[in-house]
Image: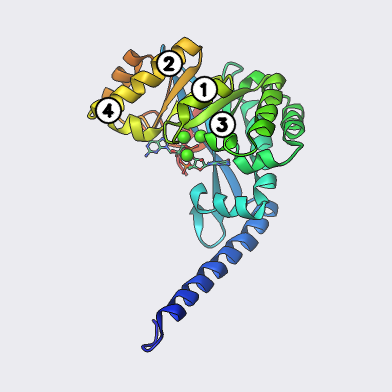
Amino acid sequence: AKRNGRNQYEFFRCDMEEVARHRLDVETDLRQALTSHELLLYYQPIKNSANMALSGYEALLRWNHPTKGLIPPLQFIPIAEETGLIHEIGMWVLVEACREAMRWPPEQVVSVNLSPIQFGRRNLVDRVKGALATSGLAPQRLELEITESVLLDETQRNLETLRQLKQLGVRIVLDDFGTGYSSLRYLRTFPFDKIKIDKSFINEVCESREALAIVRAITSMSRSLDIETTAEGVERAEQVDLLQREGCSHLQGYLFGRPGRLDILDEGRVTLSAL
Ligand code: C2E
Ligand code: CA
Ligand code: CA
Ligand code: CA
């Protein structure tokens, strides 16, 4: 509760201090989280749309905070990016996800999100190589998901990094496609293996002519460029029929499974269990 008589400026400053204090708390806790094993990966299934077989999983980060409980990534990744902690966290995610994938059938792929900040470290390629070597995972079984912001700044340098990553044999995926302001251009700048059509389009694809037109444009263009497409955010069965018809090669969304912990059964069968 705020006292009467304070002017606008003081209110403003008060809020700023609160925000700053909150940041500092999160930063301190986040440093702790890495060493106390509070970070964990959830996995969400991705289906091959041609035969609806499981093609693999996307690793999605969660923070199991000792007092605040499970925290979603959008609440702490921006702070990890500002503080540089994302380098360490990102490496942990990579190694952990590769190790996990080693337990899956060999045709299944693991997708890992990379922050644009991680491209700021010169040794990113060596780190990825290291994660593959440590885990023993075949490079073709790793997909790295990036957003177009990687290509916005430091374009030449980051393109070179992407080329080197691709030379390792890993697959490069352009995430959140369609949300940026000049997305089409990026398909010419780098030979992406796959693009993920943002869930905002998939969400409306059955109702909105515009969304359908965009999905159709993306899939037909991808097909002619020999790029695979994942529709993300698939929640309803009617979307599946439409997206299969439009030629999306992969499907991901709550309809097939929410992100969850993976438990490997004795027979080697993989199931999802919500925490
Ligand atoms: P993203 O890479 O676009 O991941 C997809 C997000 O959509 C996930 O949210 C997922 O839970 C959610 N989602 C999946 N299917 C559906 C659906 O059918 N409907 C709806 N409404 N949502 C669906 P999540 O797990 O909260 O992750 C949010 C974002 O955090 C990710 O967006 C990604 O940008 C970032 N992120 C997550 N894990 C990592 C990580 O390990 N490293 C980095 N750098 N970023 C990460
Ligand atoms: Ca992603
Ligand atoms: Ca996405
Ligand atoms: Ca996103």
Under mark 3, the amino acid is Glu
Under mark 4, the amino acid is Glu
- The yes-or-no answer for disc 3 within 8 Å of ligand 2 is yes
Please tell me how crowded label 3 is: few (under 14), some (14-19), or many (20+) other residues with Cα within 10 Å: many
Q: Is residue 88 above or below residue 258?
A: below
Residue that badge 4 annotates: 210
Residue at left offset 50%, top offset 53%: 75
Residue at left offset 72%, top offset 29%: 135
Callout 2 secondary element? helix
Q: Viewed as shown, does residue 43 lie left or right of 232? A: right
Q: Is residue 71 above or below residue 10?
A: above
Callout 4 secondary element? helix
**Residues at discs 3 and 4 in contact (Cβ within 8 Å):** no
Disc on the earlier residue, 1 or 4: 1
Callout 3 secondary element? strand
Gap in Å between the C-alphas at discs 2 and 3?
Answer: 20 Å
Residue that badge 2 annotates: 221
Q: Is residue 2 above or below residue 138?
A: below
Callout 1 secondary element? helix
Under mark 2, the amino acid is Met
Q: Viewed as shown, does residue 15 lie left or right of 112? A: left
The answer to which image quadrant residue 178 occupies is: top left
Under mark 1, the amino acid is Leu
